Image: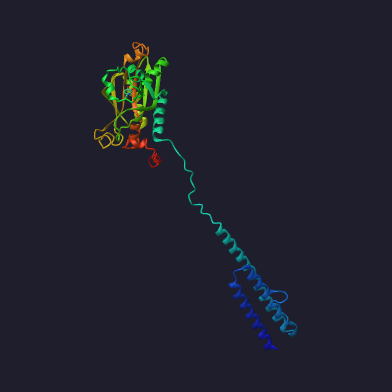
Amino acid sequence: MIEQLDVLLQQLDDLRARAIAELEAITTKAALDEWDTRYLGRSRGELKNISAVMPKLTKEERPVVGQKINTVKAELEQRLVAKRESLQQRELLAALEKERLDVTLPGRTQAIGHMHPLSRITLEITQIFMRMGFQVVQGPEVETDYYNFQALNIPADHPARDMQDTFWVVPGEILLRTQTSPMQIRTMEQTRPPVRVVVPGKVFRYEAVDASHEAMFHQIEGLLIDEHCTMADLKGCLERFAQEMFGEDRRVRFRGSYFPFTEPSAEVDIDCPFCAGEGCRTCKYTGWLEILGSGMVDPRVLRQVGYDPAKYRGFAFGMGVERVAMLKYGVNEIRLFSGNDLRFLRQF
Ligand code: DAH
């Protein structure tokens, strides 16, 4: 019977090897279940079939075969459990892979709009003066000849009127304001000193349009009236403005000039913030940039609104918003600001 025993043990080894080879190739749970029934199945499994010969064995052979069956069975069962686990693991990974989410991708941003650059510059400028105690006021864009010219010491035959070609609504009477200065008069008519206002707004001039001139643009007027006020106050105030707007190391320069409603009058320059006064294209190699007109309010203007020039004095200034924006942002074409081209506007 020894021969039969060897055959039996060989069969068990073969079965073990076959089962293991097949198991390794399995990739699905269904195939694994099938494998389980085929080799380890209780009623018709291959191991069970071999065990069926046990009763035919001798007393000596039986434990040898029995032990071998048990070892093979234990090993196959152990491998089955491991395979089941690894299949489950694979399934889980596949599911995770499907739901893969790249958390390093940038999120979808909500496009946020923003102010027009001129609105922003206007806000910046008025806020600087607000911090110095100035109130913001606004006035009509359609004005009378009186407020726009006469009350500002610009009589009908005054040569200063030639500097501002006017859009007339009613010739000689009603016009589109050529400057924000009429609000000096309107403000002083409505309040008593001390007066401290800045006036942002649109102004209109009938003139040839080019890279630095538009028929409609924006100004900010400033007016301060008090009992004690000198040109030093004007200079300090404008220097503070220039430094807050264009950098703490800015210096200002006053050049004597003429405006009908101020005496004396000055044009104010800042040293060029682009070359720090060295000379560059922006400042046309002068080292200085003109930013506004200003002066001490002419006593005739004070008298016009019923202020006593012996008691009150003050200063006024006026600047172009587009010009400040062009300098601040390095823009060399004024028409871009009114062009509503989003490719331009989005850059601010
Ligand atoms: N109104 C002037 C203009 O449009 C600017 C100006 C100059 C305003 C001197 C002022 C000033 O208040 O004092 O050219």
* Residue 316 pos. (x, y %): 34, 21
* Residue 201 pos. (x, y %): 39, 27
Q: Is residue 247 visible?
A: no
Vertical placement of 158 versus 285: above or below?
above
Residue beneath the point at 70% across and 74% down: 41
Give the residue at the far front of this rendering. Answer: 170
Towards the viewer: 318 or 15: 318
* Residue 153 pos. (x, y %): 31, 17
Quarter of the view holding residue 302 = top left
Towards the viewer: 67 or 231: 231
Quarter of the view holding residue 265 = top left
Vertical placement of 268 versus 112: above or below?
above
- Quarter of the image with the C terminus is top left
Quarter of the view holding residue 150 = top left
Towards the viewer: 307 or 155: 155
Residue beneath the point at 36% across and 15% down: 228
* Residue 261 pos. (x, y %): 31, 18
Give the residue at the far left of this rendering. Answer: 285
Q: How is the image coloured?
A: rainbow
Q: Does residue 51 appear left or right of residue 82 in this picture?
A: right
Which image quadrant shows ligand 1?
A: top left
- Quarter of the image with the N terminus is bottom right
How many numbered marks does the figure carry?
A: 0
Towards the viewer: 36 or 189: 189
Q: Is residue 189 visible?
A: yes
Residue beneath the point at 60% across and 75% down: 22
Residue beneath the point at 60% across and 66% down: 87
